[in-house]
Amino acid sequence: MKTTHLLKAAGSIACVVFALNVSAQTTTASGPADTSMGQKVDDSAITTKVKAELLGAKNVKSTHIHVKTVKGVVNLTGTVPSAEDKSAAEEVVANVSGVASVKNHLKIAAQ
């Protein structure tokens, strides 16, 4: 129980620190024509929020889940111990603010 609270607190602190760092940055170079700096920042913020939510989720064993966000679409890769963890991870991610859709490429680990 204490571990869960500690992980949630750590995730929340990481989100706040990330948000403060992002707001302090200035745009000095532009990315590819189809991706703005704002979109990259938004995707990074979404990825951070998703990771924090997965760490705090009681019904997901998320130590081997990798998260990448492109234009609001979250890609999940890695392994989980069961089909229940796979579907629970997708549900948790889909409920995160800013997530447009989820591509769940998680594999179920052989036991």
Image (cartoon, grey):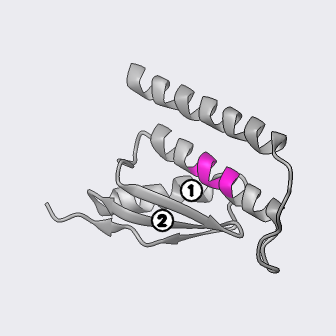
Crowd class of label 2 (few under 14; some 14 to 19; many from 20; radius 10 Å): many
Q: For residue 15, which quarter of the picture?
A: top right
Quarter residue 77 falls in: bottom left
Q: Residue at x 48, y 24 (%)?
A: 5
Which of 67/88 is in front?
A: 67
Q: Seen in the image, is 81 located left or right of residue 111?
A: right
Task: Name the residue located 60 percent from the left edge and 59 percent from the top edge.
Answer: 94
The circle on residue 76 is 2
* Residue depth check, mark 2 versus mark 1: number of the one nearer the observer: 2
The question of residue 91 being in magenta is answered with no
Looking at the image, is mark 2 or mark 1 earlier in the sequence?
Answer: 2
Camera sees residue 1: no
Task: Give the extent of the magenta segment.
Answer: 44-50
Q: Is residue 34 visible?
A: yes
Q: Amino acid at mark 1?
A: Val
Residue drawn at (83%, 68%) of the image = 30
Residue 44 drawn above or below residue 107: above
Q: Are marks 2 and 1 in contact (CB under 8 Å)?
A: yes
Report the Cα–Cα distance between label 2 and label 1.
Answer: 9 Å
Classify residue 88 by image quadrant.
bottom left
For mark 1, what is the residue? 93
Would residue 100 appear left or right of 69 to someone viewing this image?
right
What secondary structure is marked by label 1? Answer: helix
Q: Quadrant of the N terminus?
A: top left
The amino acid pointed to by label 2 is Leu
